[in-house]
Amino acid sequence: MTSTAIAVAAGKSLLAVALLPLWPLIVFKREERVLSLDEAGVSTTIGKKAGSVPWSDVARIDARDDIISITRKNANAFLVPNRAFPTPEERVQCLETIREWHRSAHSANS
């Protein structure tokens, strides 16, 4: 390798590392995401795009003080903030219900 080729490779590497923090901003979807939760799983809509994830493809459901995370087996997650619920009681009820649907889906596949 010539010194020019090494310098070009090093420059490209540095550029890639420098742009890495911008990646989430590039791929972030600015439209509002709408989640629907039912016995079948999670349905999501962003703008004109829509998809669904069955409970059997969800690895775990975690609750923290400020958020409920629904983590898929591929490690992607849906994050549901507390502001999505009119009251704390409705958040608790939703969490209990989706955990039951999740357990049911996994016991059906066992």
Image: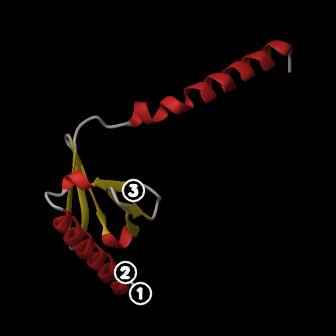
Identify the residue under disc 2: 106
Camera-side residue: 40 or 18?
18
Q: Is residue 40 visible?
A: no
Residue 3, by quadrant, is: top right
Task: Reply above or below: 29 against 77.
Answer: above
Identify the residue under disc 3: 77
Camera-side residue: 52 or 29?
29
Between marks 3 and 1, how big is the CA–CA gap?
Answer: 23 Å
Q: Position of residue 10 (x, y in %)?
A: 74, 22
Circles 2, 1 touching at the beta carbon (< 8 Å): yes
Q: Position of residue 71 (x, y in %)?
A: 40, 62
| Element on which disc 3 rests | strand
Disc 2 vs disc 3: which is toward the camera? 3
The kind of residue on which mark 1 rests is Ser
**Residue in the image at 39% along x and 56% along y:** 77
Identify the residue under disc 1: 110
Residue 56, by quadrant, is: bottom left
Q: Quadrant of the N terminus?
A: top right
The kind of residue on which mark 2 rests is His
Q: Position of residue 9 (x, y in %)?
A: 73, 22
Camera-side residue: 51 or 81?
81
| Element on which disc 2 rests | helix
Q: Earlier in the sequence, mark 3 or mark 1?
A: 3
The kind of residue on which mark 3 rests is Ala
